[in-house]
Protein backbone atom coordinates (compact mmCIF):
# COMPACT_ATOMS: atom_id res chain seq x y z
CA UNK A 1 0.00 0.00 0.00
CA UNK A 2 1.11 3.54 -0.61
CA UNK A 3 0.28 6.96 0.77
CA UNK A 4 -2.03 7.43 3.71
CA UNK A 5 -4.68 4.84 4.51
CA UNK A 6 -7.57 5.04 6.96
CA UNK A 7 -9.85 2.37 8.41
CA UNK A 8 -12.72 1.96 8.62
CA UNK A 9 -14.00 4.05 5.74
CA UNK A 10 -17.48 4.23 7.25
CA UNK A 11 -18.55 3.89 10.88
CA UNK A 12 -21.94 4.11 12.53
CA UNK A 13 -21.99 4.15 16.32
CA UNK A 14 -24.33 4.86 19.19
CA UNK A 15 -23.60 7.53 21.76
CA UNK A 16 -22.57 4.96 24.37
CA UNK A 17 -20.21 3.01 22.11
CA UNK A 18 -16.42 3.05 22.12
CA UNK A 19 -14.69 2.81 18.77
CA UNK A 20 -11.32 3.67 17.24
CA UNK A 21 -10.24 5.14 13.93
CA UNK A 22 -6.94 4.06 12.46
CA UNK A 23 -4.54 5.86 10.16
CA UNK A 24 -1.35 4.51 8.63
CA UNK A 25 1.14 6.33 6.45
CA UNK A 26 3.65 4.67 4.13
CA UNK A 27 5.53 7.85 3.17
CA UNK A 28 8.29 7.81 5.77
CA UNK A 29 6.89 10.94 7.39
CA UNK A 30 7.31 11.96 11.00
CA UNK A 31 4.30 14.21 11.53
CA UNK A 32 0.67 13.06 11.57
CA UNK A 33 -2.60 14.94 11.94
CA UNK A 34 -6.29 14.44 12.63
CA UNK A 35 -8.81 16.78 10.98
CA UNK A 36 -12.59 17.02 11.24
CA UNK A 37 -14.71 18.04 8.27
CA UNK A 38 -18.33 18.86 9.07
CA UNK A 39 -20.94 19.86 6.55
CA UNK A 40 -20.82 23.55 5.59
CA UNK A 41 -17.69 24.17 7.72
CA UNK A 42 -14.01 24.46 6.85
CA UNK A 43 -11.70 21.60 7.72
CA UNK A 44 -10.66 21.88 11.38
CA UNK A 45 -7.36 20.66 12.76
CA UNK A 46 -7.82 18.46 15.85
CA UNK A 47 -4.42 17.04 16.79
CA UNK A 48 -0.83 17.11 15.59
CA UNK A 49 1.89 14.59 16.39
CA UNK A 50 5.52 15.24 15.52
CA UNK A 51 7.96 12.40 16.12
CA UNK A 52 5.24 10.62 18.19
CA UNK A 53 4.83 13.59 20.51
CA UNK A 54 1.55 15.49 20.58
CA UNK A 55 2.34 19.09 19.67
CA UNK A 56 -1.15 20.41 19.14
CA UNK A 57 -4.56 19.85 20.69
CA UNK A 58 -6.94 22.32 19.11
CA UNK A 59 -9.36 22.50 22.07
CA UNK A 60 -10.82 19.12 21.22
CA UNK A 61 -13.31 17.59 23.72
CA UNK A 62 -11.92 14.75 25.82
CA UNK A 63 -14.36 12.26 24.24
CA UNK A 64 -11.79 12.23 21.39
CA UNK A 65 -8.51 10.63 22.48
CA UNK A 66 -5.59 10.37 20.05
CA UNK A 67 -2.78 7.86 20.20
CA UNK A 68 0.44 7.75 18.18
CA UNK A 69 2.42 4.59 18.99
CA UNK A 70 4.98 5.22 16.22
CA UNK A 71 5.55 7.62 13.34
CA UNK A 72 3.58 5.45 10.92
CA UNK A 73 0.39 4.91 12.90
CA UNK A 74 -2.17 7.24 14.40
CA UNK A 75 -5.39 6.34 16.19
CA UNK A 76 -8.40 8.34 17.29
CA UNK A 77 -10.28 6.69 20.14
CA UNK A 78 -13.92 7.68 20.41
CA UNK A 79 -16.22 7.36 23.40
CA UNK A 80 -19.53 8.87 24.47
CA UNK A 81 -19.86 10.84 21.26
CA UNK A 82 -22.70 13.17 20.38
CA UNK A 83 -24.71 13.30 17.15
CA UNK A 84 -23.00 16.62 16.28
CA UNK A 85 -19.69 14.72 16.14
CA UNK A 86 -20.90 13.08 12.92
CA UNK A 87 -18.42 14.17 10.25
CA UNK A 88 -15.66 13.07 7.92
CA UNK A 89 -12.46 12.50 9.90
CA UNK A 90 -9.33 12.93 7.88
CA UNK A 91 -5.80 11.89 8.69
CA UNK A 92 -2.75 13.53 7.12
CA UNK A 93 1.01 13.24 7.33
CA UNK A 94 4.00 15.38 6.45
CA UNK A 95 7.75 15.15 6.71
CA UNK A 96 8.02 17.15 9.89
CA UNK A 97 11.28 17.98 11.58
CA UNK A 98 12.45 18.78 15.02
CA UNK A 99 10.31 21.71 16.09
CA UNK A 100 8.83 22.38 12.64
CA UNK A 101 6.01 20.72 10.74
CA UNK A 102 5.32 23.21 7.98
CA UNK A 103 5.85 20.77 5.16
CA UNK A 104 3.33 19.73 2.54
CA UNK A 105 0.58 17.54 3.99
CA UNK A 106 -0.77 14.40 2.38
CA UNK A 107 -4.26 13.21 3.27
CA UNK A 108 -5.98 9.87 3.63
CA UNK A 109 -9.45 9.12 2.22
CA UNK A 110 -11.18 9.75 5.53
CA UNK A 111 -13.60 7.90 7.79
CA UNK A 112 -17.25 8.90 7.48
CA UNK A 113 -18.58 8.76 11.06
CA UNK A 114 -22.26 8.80 11.93
CA UNK A 115 -23.29 9.02 15.58
CA UNK A 116 -26.86 7.96 16.29
CA UNK B 1 -6.73 35.20 13.84
CA UNK B 2 -6.11 33.94 10.32
CA UNK B 3 -9.21 33.55 8.17
CA UNK B 4 -9.31 32.07 4.69
CA UNK B 5 -12.09 32.91 2.26
CA UNK B 6 -12.78 31.30 -1.08
CA UNK B 7 -15.02 32.75 -3.75
CA UNK B 8 -17.11 31.74 -5.48
CA UNK B 9 -18.58 29.00 -3.28
CA UNK B 10 -19.74 27.18 -6.41
CA UNK B 11 -18.97 27.48 -10.08
CA UNK B 12 -20.41 25.76 -13.15
CA UNK B 13 -18.68 26.05 -16.52
CA UNK B 14 -18.85 24.31 -19.89
CA UNK B 15 -16.04 21.98 -20.86
CA UNK B 16 -13.01 23.65 -22.42
CA UNK B 17 -13.34 26.93 -20.57
CA UNK B 18 -10.42 28.49 -18.68
CA UNK B 19 -11.32 29.43 -15.13
CA UNK B 20 -9.96 31.09 -12.00
CA UNK B 21 -10.64 30.20 -8.39
CA UNK B 22 -9.91 32.78 -5.73
CA UNK B 23 -8.55 32.50 -2.21
CA UNK B 24 -7.92 35.35 0.23
CA UNK B 25 -6.38 35.34 3.69
CA UNK B 26 -6.37 38.00 6.39
CA UNK B 27 -2.87 37.58 7.86
CA UNK B 28 -0.07 37.90 5.33
CA UNK B 29 2.52 36.29 7.65
CA UNK B 30 2.13 32.89 6.04
CA UNK B 31 4.75 30.18 5.62
CA UNK B 32 3.09 28.54 2.64
CA UNK B 33 -0.21 28.11 0.83
CA UNK B 34 -1.55 24.85 -0.48
CA UNK B 35 -4.32 24.06 -2.97
CA UNK B 36 -6.18 20.78 -2.64
CA UNK B 37 -8.83 18.94 -4.57
CA UNK B 38 -11.55 16.92 -2.82
CA UNK B 39 -13.90 14.56 -4.61
CA UNK B 40 -17.29 13.87 -2.95
CA UNK B 41 -16.91 11.85 0.25
CA UNK B 42 -13.19 11.46 -0.32
CA UNK B 43 -9.96 12.74 1.17
CA UNK B 44 -7.87 15.62 -0.11
CA UNK B 45 -5.40 15.48 -2.96
CA UNK B 46 -2.62 18.05 -2.86
CA UNK B 47 -2.42 19.97 -6.11
CA UNK B 48 0.12 22.71 -5.59
CA UNK B 49 2.14 24.14 -2.71
CA UNK B 50 3.52 27.66 -2.87
CA UNK B 51 6.15 28.77 -0.37
CA UNK B 52 5.83 32.34 0.89
CA UNK B 53 8.91 33.36 -1.11
CA UNK B 54 7.40 32.13 -4.37
CA UNK B 55 5.00 33.88 -6.73
CA UNK B 56 3.55 30.91 -8.57
CA UNK B 57 3.62 27.18 -9.14
CA UNK B 58 2.53 25.20 -12.18
CA UNK B 59 1.49 21.61 -12.66
CA UNK B 60 0.05 20.58 -16.01
CA UNK B 61 -3.09 22.61 -16.68
CA UNK B 62 -2.99 24.15 -13.20
CA UNK B 63 -1.27 27.37 -12.24
CA UNK B 64 -1.40 28.84 -8.75
CA UNK B 65 -0.25 32.35 -7.96
CA UNK B 66 0.45 34.00 -4.63
CA UNK B 67 0.43 37.69 -3.71
CA UNK B 68 1.32 37.56 -0.06
CA UNK B 69 1.21 41.30 0.55
CA UNK B 70 -2.37 41.55 -0.62
CA UNK B 71 -3.39 38.25 0.96
CA UNK B 72 -4.51 36.59 -2.25
CA UNK B 73 -3.98 33.45 -4.26
CA UNK B 74 -5.57 32.26 -7.46
CA UNK B 75 -5.82 28.83 -9.00
CA UNK B 76 -6.03 28.93 -12.77
CA UNK B 77 -7.35 25.86 -14.58
CA UNK B 78 -6.83 25.81 -18.32
CA UNK B 79 -9.07 23.97 -20.78
CA UNK B 80 -11.34 22.55 -18.08
CA UNK B 81 -12.58 18.96 -18.35
CA UNK B 82 -15.50 17.11 -16.70
CA UNK B 83 -12.93 15.21 -14.65
CA UNK B 84 -11.95 18.49 -13.01
CA UNK B 85 -15.32 18.56 -11.25
CA UNK B 86 -14.59 18.56 -7.51
CA UNK B 87 -14.30 20.90 -4.54
CA UNK B 88 -11.10 22.93 -4.49
CA UNK B 89 -9.72 23.93 -1.11
CA UNK B 90 -7.15 26.55 -0.25
CA UNK B 91 -5.17 26.36 3.00
CA UNK B 92 -2.42 28.46 4.59
CA UNK B 93 0.07 27.82 7.34
CA UNK B 94 1.28 30.72 9.46
CA UNK B 95 4.65 31.66 10.82
CA UNK B 96 4.68 31.50 14.57
CA UNK B 97 1.42 29.67 14.67
CA UNK B 98 0.71 26.24 15.98
CA UNK B 99 2.86 23.62 14.41
CA UNK B 100 1.33 22.16 11.30
CA UNK B 101 -1.82 24.20 11.66
CA UNK B 102 -3.26 24.50 8.18
CA UNK B 103 -6.16 26.95 8.07
CA UNK B 104 -8.65 26.05 5.37
CA UNK B 105 -11.24 27.93 3.40
CA UNK B 106 -14.67 26.43 2.83
CA UNK B 107 -13.82 25.57 -0.75
CA UNK B 108 -15.15 26.22 -4.23
CA UNK B 109 -17.32 23.48 -5.70
CA UNK B 110 -16.56 23.25 -9.41
CA UNK B 111 -18.79 21.55 -11.96
CA UNK B 112 -17.54 21.20 -15.52
CA UNK B 113 -20.31 20.19 -17.91
CA UNK B 114 -19.63 18.19 -21.08
Image (spheres, coloured by chain):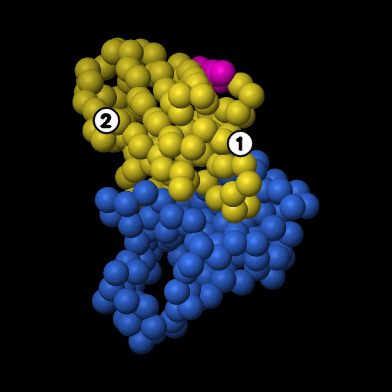
Chain colours: A blue, B yellow
Q: Is residue B16 visible?
A: yes
Does A2 sit left or right of A76 as displayed? right
- From the image, give the main secondary structure of the stretch colored magenta: strand
What whole-number distance in Å separates the C-alpha atoms at marks 1 and 2?
25 Å
**Which image quarter holds the C terminus of chain B?**
top left
Nearest to the observer: residue B79 or residue A81: A81
Number of other residues with Cα within 10 Å of mark 2, as a class: few under 14, some 14 to 19, many 20 or more: some
Up/down of A38 relative to B95, above or below: below
Does B18 sit left or right of A50 as displayed? left
Q: Chain of mark 1?
A: B
Determine the residue positioned at 36% across, 87% down: A16
Q: Which residue is label 1 attached to?
A: B31
Q: Is residue A56 magenta?
A: no
Query: Percent x, y for residue B14?
Result: 22, 18
Nearest to the observer: residue B17 or residue A58: A58
| SS at mark 2 in the image | loop
Magenta range is: B55-60
Does B62 sit left or right of A10 as displayed? right
Determine the residue positioned at 34% across, 69% down: A85
| SS at mark 1 in the image | strand
Up/down of A76 relative to A5, above or below: below
Amino acid sequence: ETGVTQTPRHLVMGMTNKKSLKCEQHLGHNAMYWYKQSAKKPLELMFVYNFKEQTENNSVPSRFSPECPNSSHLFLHLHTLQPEDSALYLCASSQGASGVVYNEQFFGPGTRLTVL
Amino acid sequence: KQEVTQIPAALSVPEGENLVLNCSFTDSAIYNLQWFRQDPGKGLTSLLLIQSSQREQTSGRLNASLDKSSGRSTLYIAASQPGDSATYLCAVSNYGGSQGNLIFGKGTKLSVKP
